[in-house]
Amino acid sequence: MHPEIADKNQQQMLAYREITDDDLFTFQWVKVELPPEEFPGYKGERVVCEACGEGINFRREVRTEEKVLCRACAGESYYEPI
Ligand SMILES: [Zn+2]
């Protein structure tokens, strides 16, 4: 749409601002299957990590062959101590 702009990224960003939503997107009603724990207020089974004793909600536990672990003890922590 904008050959006068040398930078491809700039071209694209300007074009996205100018193209109407109807030309950019296709709208369609869809159905999404979600398990109960994905809904607000879900109170599920609370299990305890066998390594650190932390309570684990929302089925976020990691089950190995012999243990039930929280994500941190299973090595899936999203943070590290500083
Ligand atoms: Zn743990």
Image: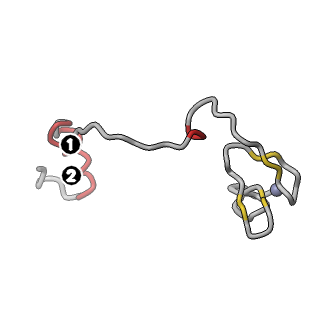
Q: Quadrant of residue 8?
A: bottom left
- Which residue sits at x=11%, y=55%? 3
* Residue that lies at the very extreme toward the bottom in this rendered image: 65
Q: Which mark is residue 68?
A: none
Check the image and tell me how it is coloured: secondary structure
Q: Amino acid at mark 2?
A: Gln
Question: Which residue corresponds to mark 1?
Answer: 26
Q: Quadrant of residue 6?
A: bottom left
Q: Nearer the viewer, residue 66 or 60?
A: 66
- Quick check: 66 left or right of 23? right
The image quadrant where one finds ligand 1 is bottom right
| Residue 74 seen in the current view | yes
Of circles 1 and 2, which is in front?
1
User: Are circles 1 and 2 on residues that touch, CB within 8 Å?
Assistant: no
* Residue type at tag 1: Thr
Quarter that holds the C terminus: bottom right
**Mark 2 falls on what kind of element?**
helix
Please tell me which residue is depicted at 82% across the width and 54% down the height of the picture.
Answer: 49
Name the residue carrying label 2.
11
Real-space Cα distance between discs 1 and 2?
22 Å
Vertical arrangement, residue 66 with respect to residue 70, above or below: below
Residue lying at the far top in this picture: please name it: 41
Closer to the camera in the image, 16 or 26: 26
